[in-house]
């Protein structure tokens, strides 16, 4: 069993695009997007084979993703979106070490359907899921 949270924030600017193959026009309005996924996982860790320092594991879980978006237009903060959506997670990992201190790498795929909002560029590209693939290195201390 495991749980966690991550924080992602990116700034950019609003754009307009008429269709998926069309030219993208920058509108010059600053845009800030932030996601905070919070999740719990249940999984299975394979047994360590004699002499093998690497141990693979996998897991599945669920949680929520908090999504915040805001844009400044003409000096005013506009287009504020604050939503919390349900999410699903799958994880594959590989851990190295035998003692209390272990190192690892983990691939996590998340699904956060119906979270991209209505209208705008998301509709043009037929996107509604703000999930995706994450790769992280990790350091674990085992009691």
Image (spheres, rainbow, N blue to C red):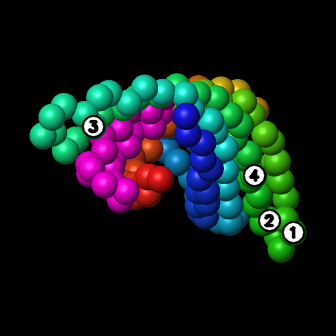
Q: Quadrant of residue 138?
A: bottom left
| Labels 1 and 3: the sequence-earlier one | 3
Tag 3 secondary structure: strand
Direction left: furthest residue: 51
How far is disc 1 from disc 3 in space, using C-alphas? 52 Å
Q: Nearer the viewer, residue 106 or 74?
A: 106
Q: CA distance from mark 3 to mark 4?
A: 37 Å
* 120 relative to 91 in the view: left or right: right
Q: Which residues are magenta?
A: 90-111
Label 4: state its secondary structure: strand
Q: CA distance from mark 2 to mark 3?
A: 51 Å
Residue at image coords 22%, 41%: 54
Residue 109's spot in the image, x, y percent? 47, 33
Which label sits in the foreground, 2 or 4? 4
- Residue 124 location, x and y as percent? 60, 31
If you read the primary sequence from the N terminus, does the residue marked by circle 3 or circle 4 appear first? Answer: 3
- First-in-chain label (2 vs 4): 4
Q: Is residue 114 above or below residue 79?
A: above
Indicate which disc residue 73 carries: 2
Q: Mark 2–mark 4 contact, CB under 8 Å? A: no
Is 19 on the left or on the right of 123, as rendered? left
Location of mark 1 (residue): 76
Q: Is residue 110 magenta?
A: yes
Reading the chain from its start, which is encountered first: label 2 or label 3? 3
User: Label 4 belongs to which residue?
Assistant: 68
Mark nearest the camera among 1 and 3 is 3
Q: Which of the labelled discs sits on residue 55, or is there none?
A: 3
Image coordinates of residue 104 in percent, x first then y, are: 33, 50
Identify the mark nearer the N-term, 1 or 4.
4
């Amino acid at each position: 069993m495991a749980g966690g949270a991550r924080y992602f924030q990116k700034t950019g600017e609003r754009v307009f695009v008429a269709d998926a193959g069309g030219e993208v026009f920058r509108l010059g309005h600053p845009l800030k997007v932030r996601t905070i996924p919070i999740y719990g996982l249940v999984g299975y860790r394979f047994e360590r084979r004699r002499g093998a320092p690497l141990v693979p594991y996998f897991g599945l879980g669920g949680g929520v993703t908090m999504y915040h978006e805001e844009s400044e237009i003409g000096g005013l903060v506009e287009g504020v979106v604050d939503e919390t959506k349900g999410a699903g997670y799958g994880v594959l990992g590989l851990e190295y070490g035998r003692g209390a201190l272990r190192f690892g790498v983990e691939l996590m795929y998340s699904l956060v359907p119906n979270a991209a909002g209505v209208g705008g560029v998301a509709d043009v590209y037929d996107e509604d899921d703000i999930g995706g693939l994450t790769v992280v290195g990790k350091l674990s201390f085992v009691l």
